[in-house]
Image (cartoon, rainbow, N blue to C red):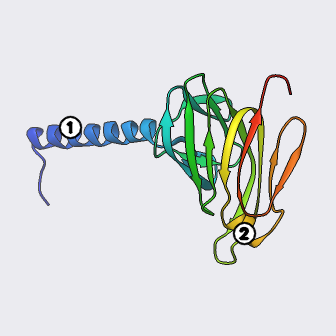
Amino acid sequence: MKCLTILGLRRLAAAAALSVGIAASLAVTAPPAAAQGATIGQVKTVSGQSFIVRGGARLPATAGDLVVEKDVIETGGDGSIGITFVDNTVFSTGPNSQVALEEFRFDSSEFQGAMVASVSRGTLSVVSGDIARTSPGAMRVRTPTTVLGVRGTRFLVRVGDDR
């Protein structure tokens, strides 16, 4: 058995401290979706003031961020966000928008699922994916005045101040 010298102990302590520092750094910079549930999509494009609201925290959105069920997407006057979901649905929000991702389930082996999103203000452009294609009506988009049942298509929703 080898004896550790004082110099060896110091090196070991320095390496341990460095490891703890790196782990803490990774924990702070890790995508916030990790602790919130299953990933349902990923932010692909971001411009201007754009945020993901999760569990009461309003986080600046960046390309590569993961989104989970119950996230709310918000943009400011110069903001936009593009998200691709795991079923290949694509959402693009425009300026001054708020879109809640209320429900998302998708079985990639059966291509079955359900999706509900609510647009309370702004614009949302949608290219539907596998959920709408394989389960007509399983994708819905709500606004303050209506509910759209999606059956596999492209569309744009605009919710103005005059609702």
User: Which residue is identified by label 1?
Assistant: 14
Compared to residue 30, the image places residue 94 above or below, namely above
Q: Give the residue type that dot 1 points to.
A: Ala
Camera-side residue: 67 or 75? 75
Task: Find the residue positioned furthest to the right.
Answer: 145
Q: Give the residue type that dot 2 points to.
A: Arg
Q: Residue 154 is drawn in which quadrant? A: bottom right
What number of labels is visible? Answer: 2
Residue at x 49%, y 37% (from the top left corner): 46
Q: Is residue 9 left or right of residue 101?
A: left
Compared to residue 130, the image places residue 109 above or below, namely below
Residue at x 73%, y 61% (from the top left corner): 105
Residue at x 68%, y 31% (from the top left corner): 97
Q: Residue 39 is drawn in which quadrant? A: bottom right
The picture places residue 110, in percent across and down from the top left corner, at 69, 77
Task: Find the residue positioned furthest to the bottom.
Answer: 110
Camera-side residue: 15 or 26? 26
The picture places residue 50, in percent across and down from the top left corner, at 56, 30
Label 1 packing within 10 angstroms: few (<14), some (14-19), many (20+): few
User: Which residue is identified by label 2?
Assistant: 133
Query: Do residues under tags 1 and 2 come within 8 Å of each other at their CB atoms?
Result: no
The picture places residue 52, in percent across and down from the top left corner, at 60, 35
Label 2 packing within 10 angstroms: few (<14), some (14-19), many (20+): some
The picture places residue 81, in percent across and down from the top left corner, at 56, 39
Q: Residue 136 is drawn in which quadrant? A: bottom right
